[in-house]
Amino acid sequence: MLENKNKNSTKLEDIGEFSLIDALTKDLKIRHKSTIKSIGDDAAVLDYKTKKIVVSTDFLIEGVHFDLSYMPLKHLGYKAVMVNLSDIYAMNANAKHITVSLAISNRFSLEAIQELYSGIELAAKQYDIDLIGGDTTSSVTGLTISITALGEANLSDIVYRDGAKANDLIVVTGDLGAAFMGLKVLEREKEVFKVNPKNQPDLDQYTYLVERQLKPEARKDIIRLLSDLKVRPSSMIDISDGLSSELLHICKKSKVGCDLYENKIPMDPQLISTCEEFNINSTTITLNGGEDYELLMTVSQKDYPKIKANPNLTVIGYIKEEKAGCNLILRDESSVELKARGWGSKED
Amino acid sequence: MLENKNKNSTKLEDIGEFSLIDALTKDLKIRHKSTIKSIGDDAAVLDYKTKKIVVSTDFLIEGVHFDLSYMPLKHLGYKAVMVNLSDIYAMNANAKHITVSLAISNRFSLEAIQELYSGIELAAKQYDIDLIGGDTTSSVTGLTISITALGEANLSDIVYRDGAKANDLIVVTGDLGAAFMGLKVLEREKEVFKVNPKNQPDLDQYTYLVERQLKPEARKDIIRLLSDLKVRPSSMIDISDGLSSELLHICKKSKVGCDLYENKIPMDPQLISTCEEFNINSTTITLNGGEDYELLMTVSQKDYPKIKANPNLTVIGYIKEEKAGCNLILRDESSVELKARGWGSKED
């Protein structure tokens, strides 16, 4: 999992900013007619014609959001793009363009930054995105990545956080908690490695969890699916901080309450077995573990026939009137107040 | 000049990310009808109708781009916005929207970040900009600011770097070199302060230079002026790295050469006197000192009557055929090759 330290190594200070940008962007493909001007001027120029522009931006900071001792640089590049595209998809919009800014300390070589970029380019290729600009600078310590994603949508298709109505279904895509447990597994391996650097990690039984942490996928497919099913959610958000935090955001913005059913929350069998091994409550992990990048939405009951047979979509509860409060219905049918990180915290 | 350390101090870890964002954005004004959705969802939504979208992004990193021992936080916020707007104006476009992302170490208080934000808001107000989103996170060390600016223009108005033609006039706005010498003055005061902290700096004779460093203005007024004069430059770039570097960019992109006249480069009298005091060649400073955020453009000779009487615009040379090379014509009429930082470097 660790970086190969034996690769060719070109010092960044030997090549300068413009040569670095040239080296990184020389093979860049332009995929969209809407990209009128890409990298190489003071700014990029885009043409979304009559569509609305959807814009989101995110920071990823070494030591805060990632640890390069278990995050390969190529995966980091890929993930940094996913984190941002996920926000565009959460608006029910199509992501089209990104800018990528890097602040890089001098411990990174040109080859290391090219490895990071190869992950960014792979993500751009797989998600049909044009990389149109950015900024590359030195940093005092570590690596900082700032990405801004732009997308387009018809106004009538855009879904906000504030549209949930009483009696709507609460629906989530995929399964939850795996990315967080993947991180726990990697952190444990790092501790083992510190004690015995010759130990080869055996991650076979955690492959799904580790992949969810290291190579998350933004749910572009769901935006297409909703369009095909002719379902427009009443509200939507992406799950970056954990299910409970995101559901509480929707309820607060929409001025509604909710009943969330513990026994409906989708979990992968590997999550359940690994939570048992770590002696952690798996529901806590799904509620509070972040970085799944699944979509949480509310859907009118009249659309239930359209979604009920779909394996990508799971109904996990109901929106209620605001006065009902936000509740988690436990397996024994008792009810507790739903809190963000109320059952523990990410740092648990 | 230094930060007031006696202000109220609220620790950031005591309030959390969402409360911080609320505290910073609660009084935010929306100025444009084109802002359909601002802060508070997964992404912002903009409507530029049939106009093209112009996008630029920049990093500002503590210890690399700014030093808080002489840069007050409010000024830093203002300058961070200017740096980005300048890139949009350099496309002959109108800046409309910004996203602001901050990575903040725990040595900063809520009040310090509010001070930074007050500068961002002042810039937004004075330049008629909507702040539409961003990301706020903790950092391991220091303060990092990432801003993305968006603007709009008709395609026929947009000016790139690659349109300069032989015989075009080379035109620059304002005067050059002052921001760099302002930095030199502040750095000297910092050294004096280190030796004797009770020493009160006397900056009266350097006010213009210091203001150019601490509170630069992006040339929005020039975009309006060019429109009023009905002049569309053949190429344009903003001067962030120094005149020679930017002019060489234009020549390289446009596949042309140039003659730049040393005796035409506009300098403020304070720059000349301070360069004498520091025993530095003032031409070197105008060629290689960065951060002026003036606009460098090329203009067809047929437009000369429209610009010749304007105090904001100075003709400093001519575009030549590529084979003529890029030349600096010295005061004695001898000619030397124009090089980026060829007469010294920023670190001199």
Image (cartoon, coloured by chain):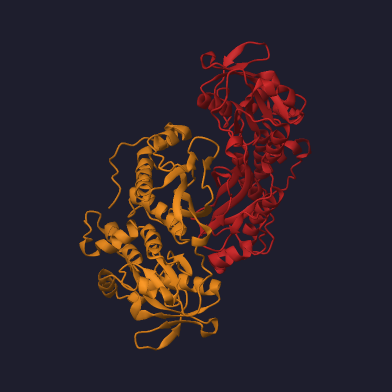
Chain colours: A orange, B red
Q: Nearer the viewer, residue A335 or A173?
A: A173
Relative to residue B190, is residue A153 depicted above or below? below
**Would residue A344 be seen by someone viewing this image from the given angle?**
no
Residue drawn at x 53%, y 78% as measured from the top left? A256
Residue drawn at x 21%, y 61% as measured from the top left? A204
- In the drawing, does residue B161 fall left or right of residue A126? right
Relative to residue B178, is residue B78 depicted above or below? below
Q: Nearer the viewer, residue B154 or A28?
A: B154
> Looking at the picture, how far across and down is residue B118, in whole percent?
68, 55
Asked which quadrant contains residue A115, the reply is: top left
Asked which quadrant contains residue A221, the reply is: bottom left
> Looking at the picture, how far across and down is residue B288, in whole percent?
60, 28
> Looking at the picture, how far across and down is residue B143, in whole percent?
55, 52
Total numbered circles: 0
> Looking at the picture, how far across and down is residue B19, in whole percent?
58, 67
- In the drawing, does residue B107 fall left or right of residue A29? right
Relative to residue A319, is residue B274 depicted above or below? above
Q: Nearer the viewer, residue A323 or A136?
A: A323
**Would residue A271 be seen by someone viewing this image from the given angle?**
yes
Q: Is the C terminus of chain B in the top left, top right, bottom left or bottom right quadrant? A: top right
